[in-house]
Image (tube, grey):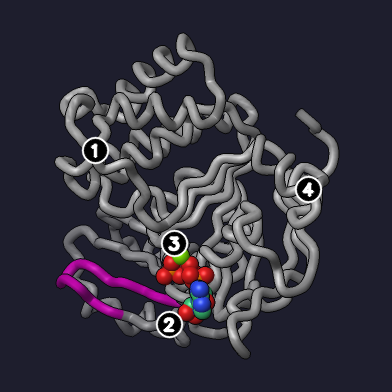
Amino acid sequence: MQMNGNCIHVSGLRMQYGNVYAVDDVSFDVQYGRVFGFLGPNGAGKTTTIKVLTTLVHPSAGSVQIFGKDVVKQAKEIKKRTGVVLQEPSFEANLTVEKALDLYGLLWGISAERRRDRTRELIDAFDMNDFKSKKNDELSIGQRRRVQVAREFMHDMDLLFLDEPTVGLDPAARRQLLDYVKKQVRGGLTVFFTTHIMEEVEYLCDEIAILNKGRLIAIDTPAGLKQKYGAIKAVEITTKDTPVRSIMHLIRPIAADALIETPADDTIRISSKEAQSMLVEIIELFSRNSIQIESIAANPPTLEEVFLTVVGKA
Ligand SMILES: Nc1ncnc2c1ncn2[C@@H]1O[C@H](COP(=O)(O)OP(=O)(O)OP(=O)(O)O)[C@@H](O)[C@H]1O
Ligand SMILES: [Mg+2]
């Protein structure tokens, strides 16, 4: 596998449907061995981008290189080393889970012995033993999705696109999938990952791009995004024996621009961009006035906050 340069290089990508740009002048790079989270509201252009990057449709403008190869001119070479789980369901209705996995491996030219091993491994990894002998038609929606995701791992690849792979999966199945992906990433796989669930992004992604109305509006590490956009933070202080009403006049001057709430008689919640530094001042204030603190809880910025801030602004 080529380790120099970027796994994905996108420059000025546009995708036009009629007179609308579903993807509009998008540029980014994805390094080898990373999990790249591609986020954005419904209709932002995520799936459209994935279709271009997986050589399923030709871009209207711009250039895309995968493994240093051009998506239009060298599609075949890219496809050989790439896996994709599309957003739309896709399955063989009349095949059992085991047979469906085996057939998928066969289509990829995997030897019979390997297919047998892989099928067994994936049925275990995705906890599908209970329904491995059922036909796809007889499966629940979430079970079908698990088969669709699992079968992609029948073949070896250097890059995997997952377009909302966990939709419909129960919490255990979701975690199994994310952990399986993580394991593959440790083995060198690069992953392009789309989801609407921020916990998954937090758990899996090294870098995040946020797309809105076809345009890339933010790109950074999860920590970097939180630092930039996760502005509003809250701290909650619970006092011991002191009703917060009685000390409000001391707190107000410190937290002048903050939103101050009292969810309980002994609890004060301060929401502000400056919550962190206010907390330090309040602790000093309490100590000067011999006010005892029962507990302190700080709410760090979440990716959900980041997402809502970034998309709301755009
Ligand atoms: N085949 C098509 N013909 C015309 N317009 C399309 C086509 N496919 C997608 N679009 C439009 O392109 C835009 C982007 O769609 P896309 O499916 O890429 O969004 P998405 O970010 O994947 O959304 P979701 O989160 O709902 O999956 C939408 O406005 C959609 O209506
Ligand atoms: Mg989509």
At a point 40% along the width and 49% down the height, the residue shown is 165
Tell me if the residue at label 4 has its CB under 8 Å from ligand 1. Answer: no
**Region in magenta:** 261-275
Single out the mark in the foreground, 2 or 3. 3
First in sequence: mark 4 vs mark 3: 4
- Tell whether position 250 is magenta: no
Measured Cα–Cα span from mark 2 to mark 1:
61 Å
Tell me if the residue at label 3 has its CB under 8 Å from ligand 1. Answer: no
Disc 4 target residue? 74
Contact, mark 2 vs mark 3 (Cβ under 8 Å): no
First in sequence: mark 2 vs mark 3: 2
Label 3: few (<14), some or many (≥20) within 10 Å?
Answer: many
**Vertical order, 296 against 96 (above or below):** below
Disc 2 target residue? 258
State the residue in front, 293 or 30: 30
Contact, mark 1 vs mark 4 (Cβ under 8 Å): no
Disc 1 target residue? 94
Indicate the amino acid at tag 4.
Answer: Gln
The label shown at residue 302 is: 3
Indicate the amino acid at tag 2.
Answer: Ala
Single out the mark in the foreground, 2 or 1. 1
Counting from the top left corner in percent of width and height, residue 148 is at 37, 41
Contact, mark 2 vs mark 1 (Cβ under 8 Å): no
Q: Secondary structure at mark 3?
A: loop
First in sequence: mark 1 vs mark 4: 4
Single out the mark in the foreground, 2 or 4. 4
Label 2: few (<14), some or many (≥20) within 10 Å?
Answer: some
Measured Cα–Cα span from mark 4 to mark 3:
40 Å
State the residue in front, 311 or 160: 160
- Tell whether position 270 is magenta: yes
At a point 32% along the width and 41% down the height, the residue shown is 92
